[in-house]
Amino acid sequence: MNTRSLLGLFSSDLAIDLGTANTLVFANGKGIVINEPSIVALNRNTGDVEAVGNDAKQMLGRTPGGIVAIKPLRDGVIADFKVAERMLNFFIKKAHKRKRLVHPRIVIGVPSETTEVEKRAVLDSAYRAKASEVYLVEQAMVAAVGAGLPVAEPCGNMVVDIGGGTTDIALISLSGIVYSRSLRVAGNQMDDAIMDYVKRQYNLLIGERTAETIKIEIGSAYPVNETASIEVKGRDLVHGLPKTIQLQDAEIREALKDCVTSLINCIRAALERTPPELSADIVDSGIVLTGGGAMLRNLDQRIRIETGLPVCIADNPLTSVVMGTGKMLTNFKLLKKVAIN
């Protein structure tokens, strides 16, 4: 079968960014058709799926005793095999807008340091969700492709993809990864840090959704021009009653300090391991940030100050991975080069 025939086979197939926080699905010829939280609501008594994605997220922290909202992925990898399979099956059918069984070929992005066992879990989940063929690609590579970096050129490109469960840092040249590192410090860990800070400082218990809202509204990695605050509601741990407090942006910056420092230290380690010729390229091209975590206010400025290198955020950081994965559907030659064996 020639390359043209192979490309034709991908006409209705899918590229998936199977993220800890959100799952995005790209359909060839249609673009992004799914962008929903990686959450499944299950009925404890019957085992039936009550809701998936956006509908399930609305249930987080609000479910009655008979229903549980589950996140099947943790730190970028599958933690609950059966639930992940059902979630994938739901999204595949929804992407094709039909209930009957579909058997698409699927390209899935995975973190750089995924173990063989974790890769097998992703593959098995996809195959059990009725995929006919599955290709795994490293998220950092496809994030660079989605951000429009010239990955096939003989020059250094550095990308930092900050997702929900992992941060992937990679140095790319000639369609290959020269150096990569996956750090399990990302958006979810930032949310946890905010919850811990509020609990420690105010004896107030808040949920994941509230912590995420605080991060998005007033979170920052470096002082902002105008101070900001937010009203936060939770449960007082001393009296057990509902309570409202006011949080300042400087407090959230303090809460996120350790996460941001770990991220910068990892970027420094990657730069120290970069070959001299490629280091010269990065001085000119700089570092590109992708993923939802890249949208943390002034994170690019903080990294620029710490490294002395140009830093920019991809045009669409939230969709860089799935857009890059989607390009694999129509570029089989590149897919063969970057797919994980």
Image (cartoon, rainbow, N blue to C red):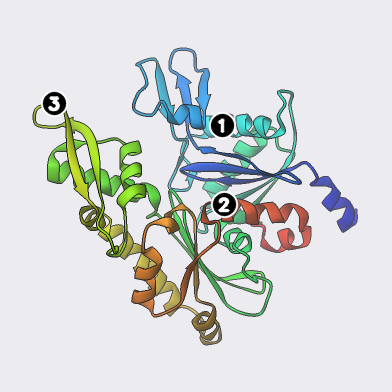
Locate residue 205, reporting x and y percent: 21, 35
Query: On the image, numbered disc 2 is attached to which residue?
Result: 319
Q: Residue furthest top?
A: 45
Left or right of residue 84: residue 33: right
Question: Mark 2 or mark 1: which comes first in sequence?
Answer: 1
Calculate the distance from the C-alpha at mark 2 to the C-alpha at mark 1. 20 Å
Residues at discs 2 and 3 in contact (Cβ within 8 Å): no
Q: In this view, does 315 lie to the left or right of 208?
A: right
Given residues 199 and 9, the one toward you in this image is: 199
Q: Residue at x 53, y 30 (%)?
A: 82
**Residue at the spot of label 3:** 240
Q: Provide the residue designation for mark 1.
A: 87
Q: Residue at x 51, y 87 (%)?
A: 276
Which quarter of the rendered picture does the C terminus lie within? bottom right
| Element type where label 2 sits in the image | helix
What amino acid is found at the position of numbered circle 1 in the picture? Met
The image quarter in which residue 133 lies = top right
